[in-house]
Amino acid sequence: MPLFTLITGGDIDVRIGVRKETGMAQRPTIHDVAREAGVAVKTVSRVINGERGVSDAMRARVRAAIRTLDYRPNAAARVLRRKVSRSIGYVCVDIAEPVQARLARAIATVASDHDSALTVSLTGSDQDRERAVIESLLARQVDGLVLWPTGAGSRFLQRLADSLPVVCVDRPIEGVETDTVLCDNRRGADLAVRHLAGRGHTRIAFVGDPPELFTQRERLAGYRDGLAAVGMAADPKIIFQRVQEAGPLRRQLDHWRASPAPPTALLAASSLSATAVVRALRTADPLEVVGFDDFPLADLVHGGLTVIGQDVDGMGRAAAETLFQRLAGDGGGRLRIRVAPELINRD
Amino acid sequence: MPLFTLITGGDIDVRIGVRKETGMAQRPTIHDVAREAGVAVKTVSRVINGERGVSDAMRARVRAAIRTLDYRPNAAARVLRRKVSRSIGYVCVDIAEPVQARLARAIATVASDHDSALTVSLTGSDQDRERAVIESLLARQVDGLVLWPTGAGSRFLQRLADSLPVVCVDRPIEGVETDTVLCDNRRGADLAVRHLAGRGHTRIAFVGDPPELFTQRERLAGYRDGLAAVGMAADPKIIFQRVQEAGPLRRQLDHWRASPAPPTALLAASSLSATAVVRALRTADPLEVVGFDDFPLADLVHGGLTVIGQDVDGMGRAAAETLFQRLAGDGGGRLRIRVAPELINRD
DNA sequence: ATGAAAGCGCTAACAT
DNA sequence: ATGTTAGCGCTTTCAT
């Protein structure tokens, strides 16, 4: 594909100066270093791996040779011998999505602390793709996986979880036991409802994504918990779970407004829902909204949007640290970690 | 570090059931497949690499054996032999930052189309770290790099660019020639000013980050271009480039309001600036703002924020495709690609 | 404390 | 069309 088809209204300047030939200088190997230093390869190996049993004089000579030649051990050769790659995979749906991106940062940071590389693959919520990218990561000898699963279980994923440390985030794999790090969605929705009730609301609606999503089922359960705790009955008429389609949401809100007992408050149980609701609201609407997931400028939208914020950094760190604990040999029972969300009040 | 220190107010359920021993079953090798199929290893190699010169019968037998044993070629061994890893690196400052995250998605998608893995490393704008993570990627034999540089050049980066295909994004490395994919920042700021002038404004301020940043210098230049084009003089008194600190910005806005000729419009030349400005504005402020970088709900903030939106997907694709073109042997002159931004009007 | 040799799993080069 | 062998760069094993 010619490059310029990629450019929308932009320019390409072809600059003078031609690339220097690449790969001309063969990269030095451990043998070159050994020769340069006048020692055996094993000695060099000992030095680069920080093994003990090397005299200071030897070590110094080897270090000097390494510097002279600008030597860097070939990771592929090491992986081949050692059977571990010091690399992990992060498989998620869409890394451009803010929560998944922040999770990536947290995981990358922990991985780096453990001298491991992080390889990122995207599934786009497609199960076949999920399998394909995981297969590819396996071929590349990743030591373990942080997985934001599409959700559905399979024999493949079962075998995967039996043969490699896998930590799921955001939701578990249906029917497959793995270490899992989840937001305490139920508590989050519960908090939101109690907050709204505390502000005097007696009719609180729920707007969310389809209940096929694990997190949505949990948040709906938490919504019911909250209502029960403040002595209110859940009314199916003010629960709307098809926020995907914008038209219906608008109609639903109109319908509620016109109803005999309109809701005066609303829990939007996902960032998508919150966005859609805020957008569908009329300026004069008296509806008080609590959203799920914090976002920049939430303090300015709709006069300040109170939200349930996930501790994304905490989740990412927990997931990655759990993974490295497994890699360090922890063979204990599977963990299910719940990270508490927080109500961020913005009246 | 014990896990529970990571959990802020959350729970850990230790579930029953102990991990199955991992790695018990040695993964099958090409030899196992050859034995199973009753052929030579080279034949298996030919099949898995799709080389021609294998009879259909052989191919079928090998395929069957592969399936039976659940064989997956060991990437480390392949890399060691072939000298190419079919993996690229994406080195950026902070992948949680929206533009860098969207870029990651675009790059990951292109990489996947080229059967390559994407390894992500973060620099946090620290030059030493930048070098360290790049060294680590080199050891891992990445075939090339997409780099969001900290900006400063060095002998190390010069040598890097001479020995490995590197495509810079967002900004170039000072003093080092590489392929580079940039937003047309200048044109973006120019567009913004013309837009504001078209709406009748005759005094347009500039708020941005420090001019040490490449993009900020370009955007300031574009701001001047725009003013010149509509026949207005740039007035240093209404250019403010220290938006980092919130206090000063607020004071600056107050100062402008109180001045004899207050600006009636403002270009906020970064997403940080736009956020800070919107937050610092008073509700009654008549100031019309154009921001840089689009964001979700920009249509609802400050009555709808007009922005200059970067074509992040286009930039990511351009960068990655350029890299793979180099990997395919294109040794032509260095490219500097400008991707046009777009004014998103939200009166 | 240091070194020689074998071999990790694959593919390139060279048979047949 | 198929097979044999060497060797990629390292670490492991076993000397010395």
Image: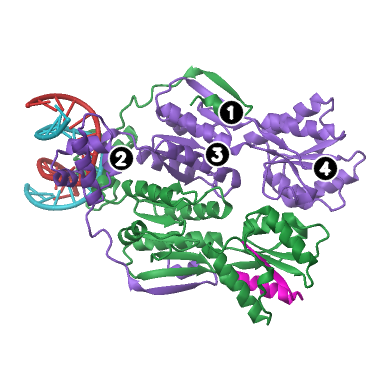
Chain colours: A green, B purple, C red, D cyan
Instruction: Please determine if labels 2 and 3 lie on a single subunit.
Output: no
Q: Which residue is mark 3?
A: B150
**Residue at 69% from the left image edge and 34% from the top image edge:** B342
Left or right, residue A85 beside residue A259: left
Q: Is residue A196 magenta?
A: yes
Three-letter amino acid code at disc 1? Ile
- What chain does badge 1 belong to? A
Residue A74, numbered label? 2
> Are labels 4 and 1 assigned to the same chain?
no
Is residue B154 visible in the rendered structure shown here?
no
The amino acid at mark 2 is Asn
Determine which quarter of the picture holds residue A74. top left
Q: CA distance from mark 4 to mark 1?
A: 31 Å
Q: Is residue B244 above or below residue B326?
A: below
**Residue at the location (22% across, 54% down)?**
B26
CA neighbours of label 3 inside 10 A, class few (<14), some (14 to 19), many (20+): many
- Which residues are the magenta region? A188-208
Q: Position of residue A257 (x, y in %)?
A: 78, 65
